[in-house]
Image (spheres, grey):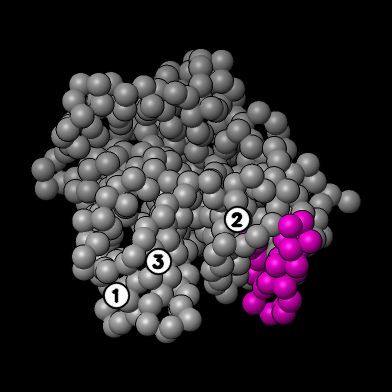
Amino acid sequence: MARIVIKFGGTSVADIERIKNVAARVKAETDAGNQVAVVVSAMAGVTNQLIDYVRSASPLYDLREYDAIVSSGENVTAGLLAIVLQGLGVPARSWQGWQIPVLTDNAHGSARILEIETAELSRRLESGEVAVVAGFQGLEPERNRITTLGRGGSDTSAVALAAALKAERCDIYTDVEGVYTSDPRIVKGARKLDRVTYEEMLEMASLGAKVLQTRSVEMAMKHGVRIQVRSSFVDLPGTLVVDEDEIVEQAIVSGVTYSRDEAKITLRSVPDRPGVAASIFGPLAEAAINVDMIVQNISSNEKTTDLTFTVPRSELERAVSVLEKHADEIGHAKLSAEEGVVKVSVIGMGMRSHAGVAQTMFSTLAEKGINIQVITTSEIKISVLIAEEYLELALRSLHAAYGLDKD
């Protein structure tokens, strides 16, 4: 008998028919003798509708009430799935975050899980009852308020629950069949990966892949939770996200990802003096604006520098406003901002021990006439900023250059 946690996303529970399909999958696991906890998202589109209601009610809303409202979608799904399971003869009960409880900090709207008390949940699982848990939500114990974990938080709920319950694995059911070497909607030759390491999945998630939420991968890596990404709509093996030790032979490059949520800011003729970077990035940090890629060029007179960096596209207007307020302190001659850029990244654990990965990327883009605007690297990834119009060409060319296309 195995103890497993299964998570179903919004598209998997979009209507009653799909909830019945989910229930059949859960029943198959219980029929096999497994103890099952199910984590569910709100039905597709429900969370967005609830957020729209909040924003329509007041542009300056109380985040505590926001959490109370937007968390209700998961409650509906959990209750409906429990009812359908009971109709199939499967003992089931729905659980809201505060009932378990899932204890979090008080950062409403993006809370972090501190602890999950699983004694009663474990007892119910051992008795043969299926626990249907509302994902995305928890309890802030100091004020006894409902909290939510941020968009995609049901993934984090599932992994955290799997860790707390010491589950054998955590299956994440979604609308894709697994983790692919690139976006199959753009790259026809993209392949589904059988296994991928936590580190690679973390880079993919943070660099644009929408399969798993970044925080859920971080938590899985920390607690050693084996994740399997599977499709709700086809009965095929998915992709296992595991420790590096479980993968016998590492590919040099495992995937090519992209992010459209990029905007570029360039400050020209910035005085080249100690503290100038702090005068730029300090105010942006205080405004909670994330800065990603950074490149600095010293001018020919060696007294000024041009500095280019990226911010989330949705934050561009606010970032420019912050910098303009501090223009006298920074002392730059000109500020330019651009939205029409994308970040393309190649990722692979094998990059640690193989030379020439960067050269392949740069020469491939050069052959296609694609100019690189900014470059950043880490031990297992290389990211470049390019003009958005070249995105599809870059993805397909790099995917082929690294030998990732289907045979």
Element type where label 2 sits in the image: strand
Residue marked by disc 3: 268
Q: What is the quadrant of residue 291 in the picture?
A: bottom left
The front one of 379 and 356 is 356
Residue marked by disc 2: 386
Type of residue at label 2?
Ile
CB atoms at circles 1 and 2 under 8 Å apart?
no
Element type where label 3 sits in the image: strand
Type of residue at label 1?
Val
Q: Is residue 28 above or below residue 271?
A: above
Where is residue 120? Give x, y as percent: 31, 42
Where is residue 336? Give x, y as percent: 41, 55
Residue furthest right in the image: 407
Q: With 12 as the anchor, is 234 left or right in this view?
A: right
- Would you say the magenta stretch is mainly helix, strand or loop? helix
Where is residue 222? Give x, y as percent: 44, 64
Nearer to us of marks 1 and 3 is 3
Residue drawn 37% across the image and 58% down it = 335
Q: Say which mark, if any, is on residue 276.
A: 1
Q: CA distance from mark 2 to mark 3?
A: 20 Å
Type of residue at label 3?
Arg
Q: CA distance from mark 1 to mark 2?
A: 26 Å
Q: With 391 as the anchor, is 147 left or right in this view?
A: left
Where is residue 76? Give x, y as percent: 36, 22
Question: Which region shows up in magenta?
Answer: 345-369
